[in-house]
Amino acid sequence: MFKSKPKSKSKLSAPAASSEVVLALTKLNKVFNPNTELENHVLHDISLQVKRGDLVALVGTSGSGKSTLLNIMGLLDVASSGELHIDGQLTQGLPELARTQLRSESIGFVFQFHHLISAFSVLDNVLMPLMLRHGKPSAEQKAYARYLLAEVGLADYMQQPTNRLSGGQQQRVAIARALVTRPALILADEPTGNLDTQTADEVFHLFERFNQEHDCAIVIVTHDPRLSARCPRTIRLTDGRILYDGHSNQHPQE
Ligand SMILES: Nc1ncnc2c1ncn2[C@@H]1O[C@H](COP(=O)(O)OP(=O)(O)OP(=O)(O)O)[C@@H](O)[C@H]1O
Ligand SMILES: [Mg+2]
């Protein structure tokens, strides 16, 4: 029943924002500590597009720049040069408030360590992004949060504090929290990195399901070749450069 509900109308950008391309990077570079002894050019001329419905694995060896790239995509960090469009909107030059608003309306994050607030109930953790945006969530928003928690198999845990949950359950809460704003884009940095194989499979299945049912784009960093093979598209970073961007089934494994 929730699937057919209209998306939030309060997007910053025009209706064209919901056009197919959710994320567009053009010749993006990142240099940490520029013009110092510690200068580190981490991302080199990254150009790529992600569309609604895409499920993309971002892979590469440790230190290749995956988290740096994901943080820039998610407006948690800024590029040194190049362009980044999110949901049709050019992000360079946006005032901080507008960046924060675009981030909270268009992007959901899932991290390896889920960053739940242990003193709060499961339901309140899921409602948190809405509370940060609007204060008190509406009845419809609360109903949607409950629906998501039921969908991730936690209907019976809504009032529990999160520190009573297992690692896999906590990651399910984090996924529901990422989805509660109905974002066009989900960015996940090693969301299963901390889980055993079976739990990782189950959590990954949730990403697959929500990708299809909610038609959101998902970029997922993973070191697990079994999981990247389940994403239709793989992007491989090597020393901060894209060396492969295409079908996962044609991706040459290392
Ligand atoms: N805040 C920072 N300041 C300076 N250098 C940084 C910073 N963050 C990352 N780096 C450097 O950027 C490079 C890429 O790091 P990044 O965390 O993006 O790699 P990664 O591919 O996510 O690795 P992993 O698989 O281990 O998580 C590394 O050389 C790292 O030391
Ligand atoms: Mg990383």
Image (tube, rainbow, N blue to C red):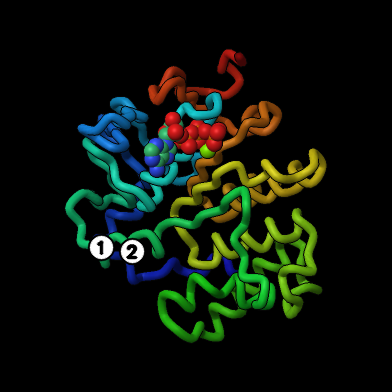
Beta carbon at label 2 within 8 Å of ligand 1: no
Compared across the picture, whether 84 is left or right of 114 comes to: left
| Mark 2 and mark 1 residues within 8 Å of each other at the beta carbon | yes
Residue 20 location (% of width, % of height): 37, 45
Query: Where residue 38 sits in the image (x, y, percent)?
Result: 32, 32
Q: CA distance from mark 2 to mark 1?
A: 6 Å
The answer to whether residue 31 shows anywhere in this view is yes
At label 2, the amino acid type is: Thr
Secondary structure state at the residue bearing disc 1: helix
Q: Which dot marks residue 200? A: none
Q: Which disc number belongs to residue 100?
A: 2
Q: Residue furthest front?
A: 37
Left or right? Give the position of 126 relative to 82: right
Looking at the image, residue 217 lies above or below residue 141: above
Residue topped by disc 1: 96
Instruction: Residue at 38% x, 45% y: name it.
Output: 73
Residue at image position (35%, 29%) is 43
Residue 233 spot, x, y in % from top left = 53, 29
Q: Which image quadrant for residue 72?
A: top left
Residue at image point 28% right, 41% down: 79
Where on the picture, by quarter, is residue 103?
bottom left
Question: Amino acid type of disc 1?
Answer: Glu
